[in-house]
Image (cartoon, coloured by chain):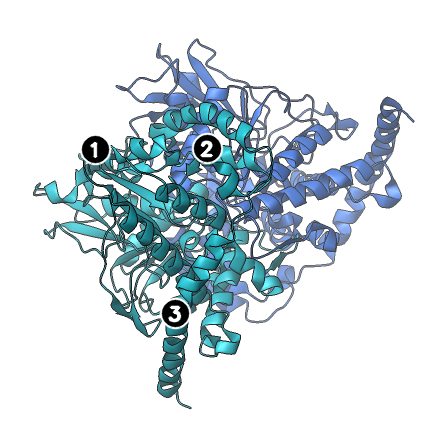
Chain colours: A cyan, B blue
Amino acid sequence: MDKVKRVSWVFSWRHLLLLSLTLNVSLLSRFIYERGIEIETDHHQRLHQELCFQKEVNTREAAMCGVSEQEAQVSRSSTSSSSRAQAADGGKQVINLDHGDPTMFEEYWRRTGEKSKIVIRGWDSMSYFSELNNLCWFLEPEFAKQITRFHRSVGNAVTHDRHIVVGTGSTQLFQAALYAISLLPPHASPQKPISVVSAIPYYSPYPSLTDYLKSGLYKWDGDAYNFTKDEPYIELVTSPNNPDGFIRQPVVNRSRGTVVYDLAYYWPQYTPITTSADHDLMLFTFSKITGHAGTRIGWALVKDKEVAKKMTEFIVLNTIGVSKDSQLRAAKILQVISDSNEHMGFPEDSDSFFLYAYHQMTQRWERLRDVVRRSGLFSLPEFSPQFCNYIGGFTEPHPAFAWLKCEGDIEDCESFLREHKIITRGGRHFGMEAKYVRISMLDRDEKFNLFVERLSNISL
Amino acid sequence: MDKVKRVSWVFSWRHLLLLSLTLNVSLLSRFIYERGIEIETDHHQRLHQELCFQKEVNTREAAMCGVSEQEAQVSRSSTSSSSRAQAADGGKQVINLDHGDPTMFEEYWRRTGEKSKIVIRGWDSMSYFSELNNLCWFLEPEFAKQITRFHRSVGNAVTHDRHIVVGTGSTQLFQAALYAISLLPPHASPQKPISVVSAIPYYSPYPSLTDYLKSGLYKWDGDAYNFTKDEPYIELVTSPNNPDGFIRQPVVNRSRGTVVYDLAYYWPQYTPITTSADHDLMLFTFSKITGHAGTRIGWALVKDKEVAKKMTEFIVLNTIGVSKDSQLRAAKILQVISDSNEHMGFPEDSDSFFLYAYHQMTQRWERLRDVVRRSGLFSLPEFSPQFCNYIGGFTEPHPAFAWLKCEGDIEDCESFLREHKIITRGGRHFGMEAKYVRISMLDRDEKFNLFVERLSNISL
C-alpha cells in the first residue's frame, strides 16, 4: 500500500474511532461521575499545592498564601476521614484551579509501562556539548530528531528550513526571543527598549516576564489593540489563546514589527489541527503536550539564522544550555507518542496518546458546558467545529483553560467563586474585566470532578 | 567503635593512602605520559568543540570561530590517520583549553557501573511541584537530603539553619542572587541599579552575566579594589578563585554591602578543606564537583529567608523551576559519592571519588609544574600546603584552572600561545594584564597530555 492510500485508510479508521468515542463520552462520563471519587490521603500536602503555587509569585503570592492559612484549617478539620469527596466534602475543600499543572495525563503514562522509561548511566551526557556542528550546540541530536518526527506525525508545524533552539521550558525561550529580537534589526537600538504587546485577553505572566528585570532592551507595552507607536515592536500571539482558547492572528500588522507565536496549545486534544503552522518564530512547550511539566523543556522553530543564534546566546548566558537528562527524557516521550500515532489506525491497538487526551478533554468540556447551561449564572466561549487533519474529522476546540464569564450582576467573578472555595485567576490579570475568570481544565480527575459538582451547586 | 574513634581511624588510613598515592604519582605519570595517546576518531567534531565554545559568545565568538576556519583546515589535513598524537601531531593540532568542560572525571563514572545509573518511568515527576511545604517548592526532597548529607560528609559547608534553593546551574543562581539582593533592604531602590563588583582577577563571565539584559536592578561596576561609592553594593567572592585558585575574602568590607560566595571549587580535589564555610549566601555547582556539566544543576545555601524567597521567585519567573529529572540524577550521583566517602577508610575498597579526583589533579599539576620549571618562559601561582580535614593530611591546592604568566618580554601570553595552537583565555577577560592566561586543567587525558607536551617544546 503506498503512503497516500495508507494515510486515507488510517483516516477512515480514525474517523470511526472518533465517532465511537464521541458516542461513548456521555455514558462514560455519567458512569465516572456517578460512582464517586476517593479523596487522596495526602490532603494536607495537596492543600498547600492548591494554595501556594508561585508561578506569578510577585503579584499573587501574598493573596494566595493569605487564603491558605485560614482555609487550610477549615479543610484539614473537615477531611480527617478518607470518605468520598462528593459525599463528605460538603463544599468545604478549597479547589484551586488557578494554575495549569497538567496532571490529568499521568494515567496514560502509567499505562505505557516499560515503553516510556529511560535509563541514564553515571557517565552519560557529561559534557556541556551535544552537537558541535549545530548552531544550538547544546541540543541533543536524538531530541532534535524526535521533534521533527513529532511535528511531521501530527502535522501542526513546518520544521523544514527551520533552526531548532531548545530551552528550559518555553518561558526561557520567550525571554530568549525578546533578547534576540531587541538586539537585531529592525530594532537594535541601544537607546530605547522595544515595545512588547499582546492582544487582550493575553497570557497573564507576559507583563511580569517582560519587566521583572527592568531590562533596557524590551518593555511591556500592554494591549496590542492600543499600540499606535510608529516604531519597532514585538507582538506576542498565543494560538490557541491562553486564556480563551481562540485561534489568533496578529492585530498590529505594521512595518518593523516582529511576531512571536506561542503555539503551546496547538495540539489535537485542544484544537482542530487545520494547517501546518509556518511562521518565522514559533514556541512550543513539552509540558502542555504530554503533561510532563516537571521536565523543563521547550523548543523554538526559528527561520532566521541570526535570531536562532541570538536565542542560543541568551540560553548560554542564562543557564549555559539545557539539561541533557531532560532532553533525553523528552525525546523518549515524544518517540512513544509518534510510535502510537503510527498504530492509531488499528482500533484493537489504539494506544494513541492524542486520541486518549482528545477523549478526556471532550468529556470534561461536555460536563462543564452541561453544568454552565443549567446554572444560568455563567457562560463559556462558543467554538465552531473545524476539520482536524490529525483526527481526520470535524472536531471542536477543547481548550486547556475555561474562560468563564459571570453573567448578571456578578461583577467580580474571581471573588464570587472564591466565596465558594473555587480559586481561579481573575480577568484583570489578562487585561480584561473582572467578570471573567480562567479555570484550569488539566488537573487530576478528583479535583475536576469536585469542581464540576461544586459549580453545579452554586445558586444566587 | 564510637564515632570519634572511627573517624580518627579512618583518617589514619586516609593519611596512608595519601602518602602512597603521592609516592605513586611520578611513576604513574611517567608511565602514562610515555606510552603515548591515541587520538580520537571524531577529530573534526572535537575541533569544532575546541574552537566554537560559546559560553561567552557575545564577546568571544567572532574571534574564536575566526581561528577555527583556518586552523581546522590545517588540523583536518594533518590527522587523517589515527596515529599516535604525540608522534604524528607535530604541533599542528589546535588544543583548546579556553573553557572548562570537566570531562576528565568520565572514567571514574564509567567504573561505577550500575551503582550510578537512574531509571525514570514515563509517569514519574510530572507535576511542576516537588514539596509544597518547602519555600523552594520545586526542590526534590531526595535531592535536598543528598545535598545535606554530601556537605556533611565532605565538611566544606554548613547546611544547618539554611534554605536550599536549587537552580539550573549556578549561573542561574548567580542571577537569582543579584535579583533578590537588589530588591531587598538595604538596597531596594527603584531609582538606581545596585553596583556589582569583584576583585581582580575575577571570573570572566561576571560582567556579561550582570549586564546582558541591561537590567535596571543591578549593574557591573568592575574591580572591587576600586569600589569607593558610599552606597549599597554586591561583592562577588569566588573561593577558591577562578582563575587563579587562591582562597579569597571580601575586599570592600563596607556597610550596606552583601557578599555572594561562589564556592564552585571548594572541594577536596581542588583545595584543602580547612573549614566548614558558614556564609550567608553560598553558591555551588554540580558540574565542577563531579564533572556532570550536561546536567544543569546548582544549589544555593541561603541564611536569610527573604533572600531565599526572592531567589526562588526569580527561578520561577526565569524557567518555572528546575527539571526534576536532573535533580534526581544529581541526587543519585551525590549519593554514590557519599557512599564512597563512608568506605574510603578501607584501601581494599577505595572507590572514593574525591581520592580519585585528588590523585588525578595532583598528577596533572606535578607534570605542568615540571614543564613550566624547565621552560623558564612561564610561571604559575605558588600555594602553601594546608591541613585538609577531608583528606586528613596536608595537601596543596590543585586548581581547576592554571593561571599561567608569560615571563620576560612576552606581553600578550594568549597570542603567544595561540601561535603554538594552544587556545587559552587571556588575562584581560579577568580584569588583569595580558601577560596572564587561564588554562583549563579538567579536559580529557588526551588533550591534557598533548598540551603538556606542546608546552614543553616551546622555546623563544
Mark 1, residue position: A411
**Of labels 2 and 1, the one closer to you:** 2
Q: Which element carries disc 3, helix, strand or loop?
A: helix
Q: Is residue A443 left or right of residue B283?
A: left
Q: Quadrant of residue A281?
A: bottom left
Amino acid found under the numbered disc labelled 1: Glu
Q: The residue marked by circle 3 belongs to what chain? A: A
Name the residue rendered at 34%, 54% in the picture.
A264
Amino acid found under the numbered disc labelled 2: Lys
Viewer-nearest residue: B32 or A390? A390
Which disc number belongs to residue A23? 3
First of labels 3, 2 by sequence position: 3
Q: How many marks?
A: 3
Instruction: Answer yes or no: are tags 2 and 1 on the same subunit.
Output: yes
Quarter holding the N terminus of chain A is bottom left
Inter-mark Cα distance, 3 to 2: 35 Å
Name the residue rendered at 61%, 69% in the picture.
B82
Q: Is residue A282 left or right of residue A235?
A: right
Inter-mark Cα distance, 3 to 1: 38 Å
Viewer-nearest residue: B378 or B107? B107
Give the x, y percent position of residue A360.
42, 59
